[in-house]
Image (spheres, rainbow, N blue to C red):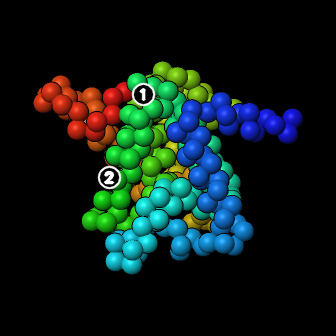
């Protein structure tokens, strides 16, 4: 029984496995007091002025301290990342996909609006891509509401809206993402799918370099 988590982890594709270990490792370091959130998040000044380049990686792996929200984020990461990784022709293509998506979010954070925890936005982006790649897969919300994965982004958006309204009334609901976070992640996922699916048909080349 005690080997079940390790056995389950070893059955996860290699990139998603390493990503999961990294997320858990960073959260454990914070929980143990070795690092703080301020040491892990991305800002342009910290990375490119102060030379703290490790933030490029830790901001992707950091989901916050161990709470229901971070556990839900980890579950989403494993589930949707695993499915997407298996849909790529080669492992290196999925690595390049994650690098491309993360780089885009970092550029957005630098030039448009600070994101700090890049990983949470990356998960929302992967969720959107997953929903478009598996539109007819049946999902359930808390074992009650059944829907196709095509509508997964809308479901999470509605949960985020309900969560923000409940907090304004002093009620705490489990909430994985803010509304703004979801919108940014979904838009970037939509742009990525355009570059992968539409752009090559128009111009004969794949600017992402990651074939699915």
Res 82 → quadrant: top right
Q: Nearer the viewer, residue 50 or 168?
A: 50
Residue beneath the point at 33% across and 29% down: 211
Q: Nearer the viewer, residue 138 or 70?
A: 70
Picture quarter with the N terminus: top right
Q: Is residue 24 toward the left or the right of residue 183 in the image? A: right
Residue beneath the point at 35% across and 59% down: 106
How far is mark 1 from mark 2, CA to CA? 22 Å
- How crowded pointer 1 is (Cα within 10 Å; few <14, some 14-19, many 20+) is rated as few
| Position above or below: 7 against 123 | above
Residue 205 in percent (x, y) is at 18, 31
Residue placed farthest to the bottom in the image? 50
Residue 83 visible in this rendered orientation of the protein: yes
Q: Which mark is residue 14?
A: none
Q: Is residue 128 toward the left or the right of residue 146 in the image? A: left
Residue 26 in percent (x, y) is at 61, 60
Residue bearing mark 1: 90
Residue beneath the point at 32% across and 52% down: 104
Residue beneath the point at 46% across and 46% down: 124
Residue 59 in percent (x, y) is at 48, 61
Q: Is residue 124 toward the left or the right of residue 106 in the image? A: right
Picture quarter with the C terminus: top left
Give the mark, 1 or 2, whose residue is nearer the N terminus. Answer: 1
Residue 172 visible in this rendered orientation of the protein: no
- How crowded pointer 2 is (Cα within 10 Å; few <14, some 14-19, many 20+) is rated as some
Residue placed farthest to the right in the image? 1
Residue bearing mark 2: 104
Residue 167 in percent (x, y) is at 60, 63
């Amino acid at each position: 029984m005690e080997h079940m988590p390790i056995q389950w982890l070893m059955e996860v594709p290699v990139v998603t496995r390493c990503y999961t270990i990294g997320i858990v490792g960073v959260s454990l370091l914070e929980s143990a007091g070795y690092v703080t959130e301020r040491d892990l998040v991305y800002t342009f000044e910290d990375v490119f002025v102060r030379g703290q380049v490790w933030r490029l990686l830790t901001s992707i792996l950091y989901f916050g301290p161990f709470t229901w929200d971070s556990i839900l984020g980890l579950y989403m990461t494993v589930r949707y990342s695993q499915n997407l990784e298996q849909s790529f022709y080669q492992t290196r293509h999925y690595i390049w996909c994650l690098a491309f998506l993360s780089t885009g979010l970092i550029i957005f954070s630098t030039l448009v609006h600070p994101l700090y925890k890049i990983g949470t936005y990356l998960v929302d982006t992967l969720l959107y891509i997953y929903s478009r790649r598996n539109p007819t897969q049946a999902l359930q919300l808390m074992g009650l509401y059944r829907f196709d994965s095509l509508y997964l982004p809308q479901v999470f958006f509605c949960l985020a809206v309900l969560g923000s309204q409940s907090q304004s009334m002093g009620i705490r609901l489990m909430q994985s993402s803010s509304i703004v976070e979801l919108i940014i992640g979904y838009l970037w996922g939509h742009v990525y799918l355009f570059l992968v699916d539409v752009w090559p048909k128009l111009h004969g080349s794949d600017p992402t370099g990651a074939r699915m």
